[in-house]
Image (spheres, grey):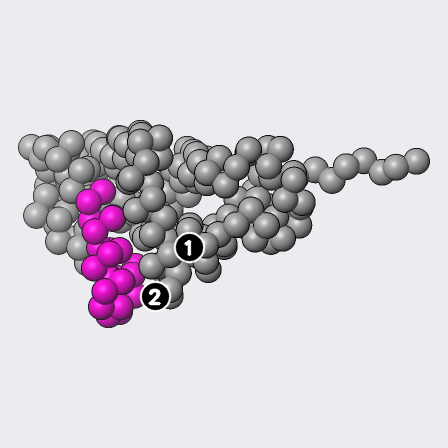
Amino acid sequence: MAGRPRTIREEDIMAAVAAAVGSAGPVRLTLADVARAAGVSTGALVQRYGSKRGLLLGFVRWGLTREAFVGPMRAAFATAPDPVEGLIRAVVRSAGHETGPEEFANNLAFLHLELADDEFRALLGDHLRGVRAELRGYLEAAVASGHLTGGADLGALAAAADSIRNGTQLTWAMTRSGSLAEALRRDLRTLLDPYRTSKEDR
């Protein structure tokens, strides 16, 4: 009697895509590379995703889900002693691990692909709005707890924090001075410190 077919876990496939993008870049990546890393057949990937583009779209959708992206941010926020520090920890967590120059360049090449394709770009736009709404929620918690002044434009602050989340990663990759986490904390504190309240005001 034949055994049951192997269940293909989405997490395994997506981890294989991430590794292949980091090592080969989106242009040189093949379905066979991903299949080999995930321990499945190329045919199984074709059956599920249809093509390399379909697989990469699935990878983007999976990576930008609330559970995959916002969940770890919220976990980091919850560990902080106050909501301002919580926002900083959440942004640092969202940046992920530091990558070497080649892997960073390959991931940047993937971003170029996303920006040039309407369907990929629409996913990024939805993600951007979701992340900024998440960051605004952290800022609202900071105002409610008395750690941030009430007169701040929270929408603008959330947008600026998100711009730092993206921009600091790029500038850090150019210099690689210190750690990425340190660079993000420095730039976010520069943004937020003028809006912090003193302990006496709380």
Q: Residue 170: horizontal and vertical position, in percent? A: 24, 56
Secondary structure predominantly adopted by residues drawn in magenta = helix
Q: Which residue is mark 1?
A: 25
Amino acid type assigned to the residue bearing label 1 in the image: Gly
Which residue is at the front of the view, 162 or 33? 33
Amino acid type assigned to the residue bearing label 2 in the image: Pro
User: Looking at the image, which residue is at 29% across and 65% down?
Assistant: 179
Q: Which residue is mark 2?
A: 101
Which residue is at the front of the view, 46 or 71? 46
**Mark 1 Cα within 10 Å, few/some/many (few <14, many 20+)?**
many
**Mark 2 Cα within 10 Å, few/some/many (few <14, many 20+)?**
few
User: Looking at the image, which residue is at 14% across and 47% down?
Assistant: 192
Q: Which of the 4 image quarters holds residue 2?
A: top right
User: In the drawing, what numbered circle is on residue 170?
Assistant: none
Q: Residue 161: horizontal and vertical position, in percent? A: 20, 44
Q: Nearer the viewer, mark 2 or mark 1?
A: 1
Quadrant holding the C terminus: top left
Q: Is residue 86 left or right of residue 17?
A: left
**Magenta stretch, residue numbers:** 162-184
User: Looking at the image, which residue is at 33% across and 52% down?
Assistant: 109
Q: Which of the 4 image quarters holds residue 126?
A: top left
At mark 2, the secondary structure is helix
- As for residue 17 lying within the magenta part, the answer is no
Q: Is residue 5 left or right of residue 30?
A: right
Q: Which of the 4 image quarters holds residue 78?
A: top left
Task: Tell me which numbered mark, 2 or 1, is placed earlier along the sequence.
Answer: 1
* Residue 85 shows in the view: no
Which residue is at the front of the view, 55 or 103? 55
The alpha-carbon separation of the residues under discs 2 and 1 comes to: 12 Å
Residue 33 against residue 163 in the figure, above or below: below
Q: Residue 48: horizontal and vertical position, in percent? A: 59, 33
